[in-house]
Amino acid sequence: MQRHRLSPRRAFLAALGAAVLLAGCGHKRPPVLTATPGQPAPAPAEHLDRAPARPVDEGPDVRAVGGEGATSADLAGRTGSGEGGPLADVHFAYDSSALSDEARATLEKHAVWLQSHRNVKVTIEGNCDDRGTVDYNLALSEQRARAAYDYLVSLGVAAARLRTVSYGKERPLDPGNTEEAWARNRRDHFTVSP
C-alpha cells in the first residue's frame, strides 16, 4: 500500500483552511435579516443609526431594526392582535415552520388588508420559544418568517413591500416556562411601516 504525502504547501493551505473554519465557530451569529428579491439587504450600521419604534434589548444575538413603527396617518387608530399592530401574529407548532390552516387564514386577511393599504411595508419577524440553541432558533425563526413571506407573495402582495428578520428566542412575548407561554412565543410578528 502506497502512502501519499502532502507537499509542504498543501499541508500549510490545509492547516490555514482549518484555522479559518475554527475561527468562525467561536462567536454567535446576529439575527438573520433577509433581503427581499430585487432589493439588497440593508447594512447593519444603517439599522443601528435610527432609533427603534419600540425598545429593543440589544445584545450579541439581536440588532435593532429601524423604521418599524406604524406611524403612517393611514394606520392611526387601527388595532390588531399580537403586540398592538394592525396585523395579527401567526403562531407555529413546536419545532415547525409549517403554516397551519389558522395561520393561512390570518395571512389571507393580511393580504387583503395590505392590498387596501398599498403605501405600507411590512417586516415579518420570526420568533421561537426559549427551548433550543441560539443558532437553531435563529434558523427556525428565519424559516417561519420566510414561510409567511412566501405565502403572502403567493397571495399577490408585492415582494418589494415585505422583508424578514429572525429574532430566534430573543424577543419573547411571555417569559414563562409553560406550554402556554412557549406557544405564544412561537410566532411571526408583523411590523408595519409607511
Image (cartoon, rainbow, N blue to C red):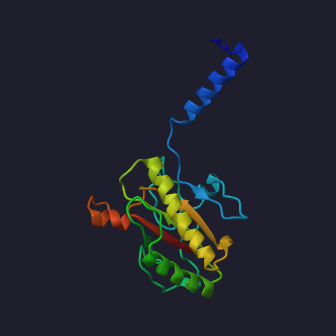
Left or right: residue 44 versus residue 78 is right
Q: Quadrant of the N terminus?
A: top right
Horizontal side, residue 9 vs residue 63: left or right: right
Q: Residue at point 57% right, 81% down?
A: 111
Q: Which residue, as the protein is rendered here, is positioned at the far left?
A: 178
At x 59%, y 32%, the residue is 21
Q: Residue at x 60, y 27 (%)?
A: 18
Give left or right: position of 48 versus 178: right
Quadrant in the picture for residue 171 = bottom left
Q: Position of residue 127 (x, y in %)?
A: 45, 61
The answer to whether residue 20 of the structure is visible from this angle is yes
Which image quarter is the C terminus in?
bottom right
Question: Residue, x 66% and y 71% (percent of image)?
Answer: 159
From this view, report whether residue 7 is shown above or below residue 68: above
Q: Is residue 5 above or below residue 32?
A: above
Query: Measured along the vertical axis of the image, is residue 125 above or below residue 156?
Result: above
Q: Position of residue 27 (x, y in %)?
A: 51, 39
